[in-house]
Image (spheres, helix red, strand yellow):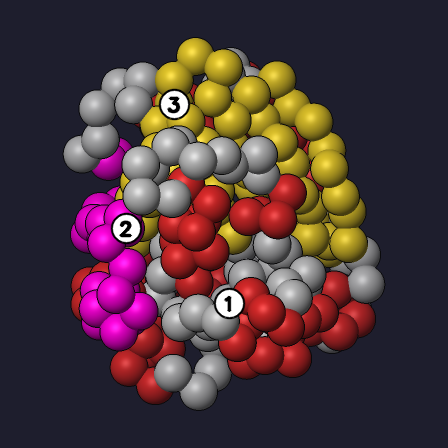
Amino acid sequence: MRNSEEIKKIVKKKYASIAKDSNCGCGCGCGQKVAKEIGYSDQEISGTEGNLGLGCGNPVAFSKIKEGDTVLDLGCGAGFDCFLAARKVGSTGKVIGVDMTKEMIERAKLNAEKLGTKNVEFMLSEIEKMPIPDNSIDIIITNCVVNLTPDKSETFKEARRVLKTGGRIYLSDIVLLEDLSEEQRNNDDLLSGCVAGALLKDDYLNKLKAAGFKVNILKEDKEISKSQYKGIALESLMVEAVK
């Protein structure tokens, strides 16, 4: 069984490569086709930067982001969801994107410059421990990222710490419907591809609740298993968790 540092090293290497390449993504798929399959509109895809086809849903579409909010994106990648959220918060709001891969943060900053987006900040940090003040965030979004983290419980606790009372986190994530084999758990491609590190659905939800969240399931997509994961028993789960 890999330790936390080994997992992070594998994930960082894969996503650094993706950030430099731009033509492909993880096991979650790649490009405009996948973005449409997981819930993004043509307008969202063509109207912004940073779409690397890495998500498993569209958390911004489900979120209740309003003008003036401070929004945090956990595992922001090249900034796609951040830029969509930035439109919703407007000039009086702010979006913070956090990612542990230096190459992704660099690319996100370049995308922000290209778009001329002024209300987005990108920060190099692991999401289990962020340099963000307590009770400072209105809305958290995260897209197919928590499954990549070695310590999900710590990630959820950290998310709750930075949220204001009544704040919400919108999670689009891969969860398992059956246990993986030992061989699958130790497959590097499945790890960086959002599968090997995923939790069983009930375990995932129970960790959220144990961190102090009230959990509402918004959507479940089992078809993603056939379209992107070769029939592995999993689904994309869209959850609203309220502090």
| Amino acid type, mark 1 | Leu
Mark 1 residue crowding within 10 angstroms, few (<14) / some (14–19) / many (20+): many
Q: Where is residue 96 drawn, in percent x and y?
A: 29, 44
Q: Position of residue 1 (x, y in %)?
A: 44, 52
Q: Are marks 3 and 1 in contact (CB under 8 Å)?
A: no
Of circles 3 and 2, the one toward us is 2
Closest to the observer, 223 or 47: 47
> At 69% across and 53% down in the image, what residue appears?
236
Q: Residue 165 carries which label?
A: none
The residue range painted magenta reads 109-130
Residue 186 seen by the camera: no
* Residue assigned mark 2: 120
Residue named by callout 1: 54
Quarter where residue 35 is shown:
bottom right
Residue 222 at x, y percent in the picture: 80, 56
Q: Which mark is residue 163?
A: 3
Displayed quadrant of residue 151: top left
Q: Is residue 149 above or below residue 239?
A: below
Of circles 3 and 1, the one toward us is 3
At label 2, the amino acid type is: Val
Q: What residue type is labelled 3?
A: Leu
State the residue at coordinates (47%, 21%). 167
Position of 49 relative to 144 (above/below): below
Residue 102, visible in the rendered structure: yes
